[in-house]
Image (cartoon, grey):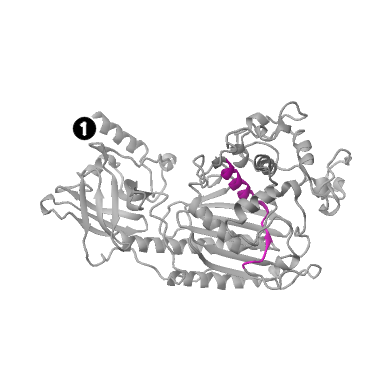
Amino acid sequence: MMNWYFLNLLGVALVNAACYEPNQAYPPPSYAPDDALLKRTFASIHAALEVVVAAPEFASTSFSVEVTSSKQSLWSQHHTAVERNASRPDIPTVNGDALYRIASVTKSFTVLALLYQHAAGNLSLDDSIDTYIEELRGKEAGSIPWKDITLRTLASQLSGIPREFAQSDLINSLPKPWEYGLPPVSRHGLLKCDEYSHGYDVPCDKANLLRSVKSKTPLFAPNQRSTYSNVAFELLGLAIENVTNQSYESYINDAIFKPLHMTKSTLSKPPDNAGVIPMDPQYWGVDEGIQNPTGGIYSSSTDLSKYLRYILTHYSDITSAASWAHPASPATGLQSFYGMPWEIFQTNRILINSSRTVRFITKGGGLPGYFSIIMYLPEYDLGFTILVAGNSALLKTIRELVTVEVVRAAEKIAIQQLQERYAGKYVSSMAHLNSSMTLIADHRGLVLAQLISNGSDISGPGGLARMFAPPDRPWYGVLVPTLLYRNENAQKGEKWRLILAEERTDGDQPIWEDFCVTDVDAANYGNLPVNEIVFWSGKGTAVETVELTGFRVTLSRQDEEEPSHLWTDESQEPLEL
């Protein structure tokens, strides 16, 4: 008779049964720049972008786009505007070193600086901001509860404080506000820097920032809900200065630009012939002053690929206080989240044969004349940079064309590598055990086709797996990589977990069918996990043996012809414009 523990497990499985495809179905793929599928994909994207940018509305727009893995840049494309800014001669031909203002992408550098300082023990992400800015302590004219707002809260767009202190005031952009239904108001008491100054020629300083924010009221209580704030990162910049005893600009240069060999990137205005300067209005030479931590960096696609390669290899181990890739709060809708300071987008519509969720960890930015975004996808080991000077509409077009086609190509490469490295039949060398496992690779990931242990078909109708599967729904067993190793020092013995996923069915489903609680530790047998599978490779990359931890058995891979039902590459169709 099944005991209470297994009844409980079965109950959990039934309540949370609608767990479909795992978000990470395989280890990140590896890429060769001369891979035929990648070359076709990039050639197709290049041709499509050439057609797009030939449209009249983009005649005065330049762009740079680059795709990188954690190891190397895979592809780039650059376009020099046909119509140039005659009053500000810029770089003759746009290339990978051409500098753009990257605007709010700068916020990610500010957060990286925070993570470094937390790791060094010089500050804590969970300390309140007034710990590091003494001017925010005590009485003030406003009502923002600074003692309750932490560095982490500010970095995660959860502070509830206003968005701006020296920008976005309609009094500066509407010469006749009464024509828009606004009453005349006096400029007495307003700032005299940034957009309040003539031609943005007076940058705001620390005193301007603190005088303004200390008079403000909050939009929300801290951690109540997310809302975008530039002021949050200006305050974080001050905290960084106070704990490092350096200017923000010098610290970013010393701690990030130099170690990552981002030789072109700067927080000072570069010479005009080093950058891309679009038609007016543009923000090329504006000194952002105290607002540098929220949007002051100039950078290039080559430098930002170096930055993304660093992030792809370090996002989870900069500090134990946070995994940099994780969401911190929901934004608006089902697919959007804030991180620190990432804008995270999840979609299940990008893959052709699967509705598995793909997560883009992004940071975008915009200033007059400049529009930028960086993105990274740890699941696919990919980073994207898109920099536009001119018409902002081009960024959205490039983002759609590049990300969709590259991710689809990466998916095919990943599945092909699953086939080559893991798929096949594994058999015990001890014939009397009658133990074997067959794995296939397809759009679902690495799927368990059959598992026999001591003559019992574990995956069959009456097998052990049925104990944890929904009794009235189609399901399958899929292996999920933990990205950990039995031998961490040698990076040997890949540890995976077998989970049961439901097959999606057509037609309308109950609302709560989308509810799923992640649980990959199914049960133990004799204090060892029954669903842990450890892959061991030989001298090459292909797996030679598999250890079924809970079953106390090791299986060896059999050489056999590739089964006809395995997933195969499909011909790539031309991009639709």
- Give the percent coordinates (x, y) of residue 498: 31, 47
Is residue 105 something that shows in the picture? no
| Magenta stretch secondary structure, dominant | helix
For the C terminus, give its image quadrant.
bottom right
The stretch of residues the image draws in magenta is 96-117
On the question of residue 393 being in view, the answer is: yes
Q: Residue 140, located in which quarter of the rendered image?
A: top right
Please indicate whether residue 454 sits to the left or right of residue 521 in the image. Answer: left
Q: Position of residue 102 (x, y in %)?
A: 66, 56
* Residue in the foreground of this view, choosing between 516 and 90: 90
For this orientation, the residue located farthest to the left is 432
Left-right relation of 426 to 20: left
Which x, y percent locates residue 337? 55, 45
> Outermost residue, top direction?
139
Residue sitting at 35 percent across and 53 percent down?
490
Q: Is 140 inside the magenta-drawn segment?
A: no
In the rendered image, residue 551, in percent from the top left (x then y), is placed at: 21, 44
State the count of labels. 1
Residue under label 1: 2
Name the residue nearer the viewer: 233 or 77: 233
